[in-house]
Amino acid sequence: MYLSKILGAVLILLCILFLGLQYQTLEYEASGVRALGLIVLLCLYLFNGNNRHPLFLLFLLFFTFAEVINYMTYPFEFPPLDDIDYMYYVSNVISILAYTFLILRILSGINIYKAIAKFPIQSILLVVLSVFVVYLVTDTTGADLDFYEYTLEFTYNTVVIILMSLSLLYYMLKEDLKSMNLLIGSICILFYEILQLAYYYIEKSEVLNLFCSLFFVTAFYFYYLQSRLKHVEIVEYSDKSQRLDL
């Protein structure tokens, strides 16, 4: 209990420090604080989680690993091998795997066919919107990327939009606090990724960077909140309904 409180307090201080460093555009220092914050969050989840799920744990592990790699390689200019920046690919592939584990976590809690059958129109609209957003976001940076980088960014953006879409479908099915926190976290992740692309490829604005960081911190805050909750199901009887913790 005391260890969890200490880790929670340390995490809050790291979040404040991270946002301050990002606003000052101290990218290297902010990268280190972000990696350290994710390590603390991972420890907090391990020590304080009564509802630990292996897929969510893998999500935290892989995302933390990607951030540690980003920090460790940030100050170094690795000579490209065959004109390919392999660390760029390694870091992004690990992040894609992290989001994939979170997607699998969502899919493990719902019957996707039942969800589509229950919300057919909403599902079609989500697919159309997802395709539009992926192409729009990726084409924004297309002029600055070669074929392989474009393919990686397209895959990355596709995984993120799938995560957000499934989180919305998940919430429509569950309609409880846990699924709502998951949805808010996924929406924040989507905005974080979009603003991050805008910051690196369109305009390096301190305000844009700050909002990007705020969405990142908010996303993991809500992800952690949902990890501590159980689902609540409405069980209907002939004369009343009762909510049960699952």
Image (spheres, helix red, strand yellow):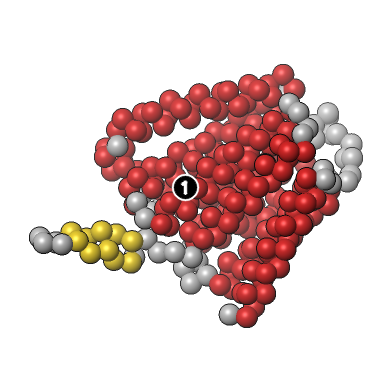
Q: Is residue 195 above or below residue 146?
A: below
Q: Residue at x 82, y 45 (%)?
A: 24
Q: Is residue 55 above or below residue 6?
A: above
Element at label 1: helix
Q: Quadrant of residue 211?
A: top right
Q: Residue furthest front?
A: 207
Q: Mark 1 is on which residue type?
A: Leu
Q: Residues within 10 Å of mark 1 (few under 14, many from 20)?
A: many
Horizontal side, residue 134 vs residue 108: left or right: right
Q: Is residue 93 visible?
A: no
Q: Is residue 141 above or below residue 41?
A: above
Q: Is residue 157 visible?
A: yes
Q: Residue furthest top?
A: 143
Horizontal side, residue 164 vs residue 192: left or right: left
In this orientation, which residue lies closer to the viewer: 195 or 42? Answer: 195
Q: Residue at x 49, y 26 (%)?
A: 131
Q: Residue at x 37, y 55 (%)?
A: 176
> How many numbered callouts?
1
Q: Residue at x 58, y 66 (%)?
A: 45
Residue 162 horizontal/vertical position (percent): 49, 38
Horizontal side, residue 12 vs residue 245: left or right: right
Residue that label 1 marks: 183
Residue 177 horizontal/vertical position (percent): 41, 57
Q: Is residue 142 above or below residue 198?
A: above
Q: Quadrant of the C terminus?
A: bottom left
Residue 64 horizontal/vertical position (percent): 67, 55
Q: Quadrant of residue 203?
A: top right
